[in-house]
Amino acid sequence: MDNQKIRVDFPMLIKHPDFIYFDNAATTQKPKSVIDALTNYYENDNFNVHRSVYSAAERTTQIFEACREKVIQFINAKENKSIIFTAGTTQSINQVANGYYKYNLKKDDEIVVSIAEHHSNLLPWQNIAKQNGSKLKYIDINEDGTLNLESAKKVINTKTKLLAITAVSNVLGTINNLKALINIAHQKNVDVLIDAAQAAPEIKIDIQELKPEWMAFSGHKMLAPTGIGILYGRKDLLEKMHPTQLGGEMIEHVDKNNFKTKDIPYRLEAGTPNIEGVIGLSTAIDYLQSLGMNNIEKYCKALGQYLYDQLTKIDGVTVYGPEKRQTGIVSFSIDNIHPHDAATYLDFNNIAVRAGQHCAEPLTNKLGVNATLRASMYFYNNKDECDKLIHKIIEMRSFFNGA
């Protein structure tokens, strides 16, 4: 990939050439094509969907539904009825928890997650376990931060009803062996939900190969606007899901005492959807596909490895996760400098990194620290930016140590 040519597509990077953005795991910058798609929608196609019969609104509905087909192709699923538009990964997982497992888990049933889960794939299951009397169990990680498959084999058993697992750790950047995990789960007739929030931006996903029951991801981490997300669900499970919201456009018939819902996916998409978000997601998928997901994965992996190698050469810097990097996410800490102080110092030097627990407090506790720094890179980042970060970390250590 031609990194310099790619950077021209991103207005923020052009307008602020000295700003280094290393917080892509939080949200990605948007290419001009996505921004233009939103502008075009508001200037030419700003009509509601699925309800009006005039031609302009029908055209907008066609544009909207075309994105559902595009998502199907992006994740290689079978049919568009399995795709639900949501506000993001968090809402998607909560919808599965409160619309399906709330009604399908009983006392002493078990839910399995990993110790490395983002809070969005942990708190809903904690809540459901408390409500239903179910038990929440954890898969541990190895010393290098990779998921312990032997632990998974021990924890997942005949009482387990759901394995809810991240595809990529938002802290360690590790890619979990989904094929092995799903195989372990399916041998015990256990459903699998994949949190693909950090995977969808960098890694080619193949639903038909993996065969999970559920998957969730967010648009804003893959060049699209905020407030749009995807829930994939196996059709037969979605048909049994209880709508978590009731209202307009999800009903077939209403009288004074009862109502009948539409078929999926519309029965699970109450109210006016995030139309501009869907259109932006459609354009973002086009952009990613033009680069090639395999190319993106290869580039981000190499950049993550380069930064890891440079950081490990600095005395007093601890990098978390395996030596062989898999993504562009690298978390680290600096001896005697609190991550918040370090992030502030870097901010003064136009470098944006994340500092804190990264919405994964159980994992942070497992690592034995109260917070870390995280540099998360994407295909528009480059080695020159990594070198500048390294230089400022070395400079920072001298500054804080009074040299």
Image (tube, grey):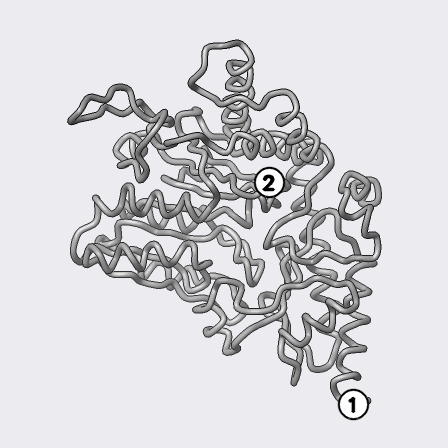
Q: Residues within 10 Å of mark 1 (few under 14, many from 20)?
A: few
Q: Is residue 64 left or right of residue 234?
A: right
Q: In this view of the protein, which residue sits in the foreground, 377 or 47?
A: 47
2 or 1: mark nearer the eye: 2
For disc 1, the marked residue is 402
Residue 148 coordinates in the image, percent (x, y): 44, 63
Q: Is residue 24 left or right of residue 14?
A: left
Residue 191: quadrant of the picture? top left
371 w.r.t. 99: above or below: below
Q: Is residue 52 left or right of residue 347?
A: left
Q: Amino acid at mark 2?
A: Pro
Q: Amino acid at mark 1?
A: Gly
At 47% from the left and 22% from the top, the residue drawn is 49
For disc 2, the marked residue is 225
At 44% from the left and 49% from the top, the residue drawn is 90
Disc tally is 2
Q: Quadrant of the N terminus?
A: top right
Residue 62 coordinates in the image, percent (x, y): 52, 17
Q: In this view of the protein, which residue sits in the foreground, 245 or 351?
A: 245
Residue 337 coordinates in the image, percent (x, y): 66, 81
Residue 94 coordinates in the image, percent (x, y): 36, 47
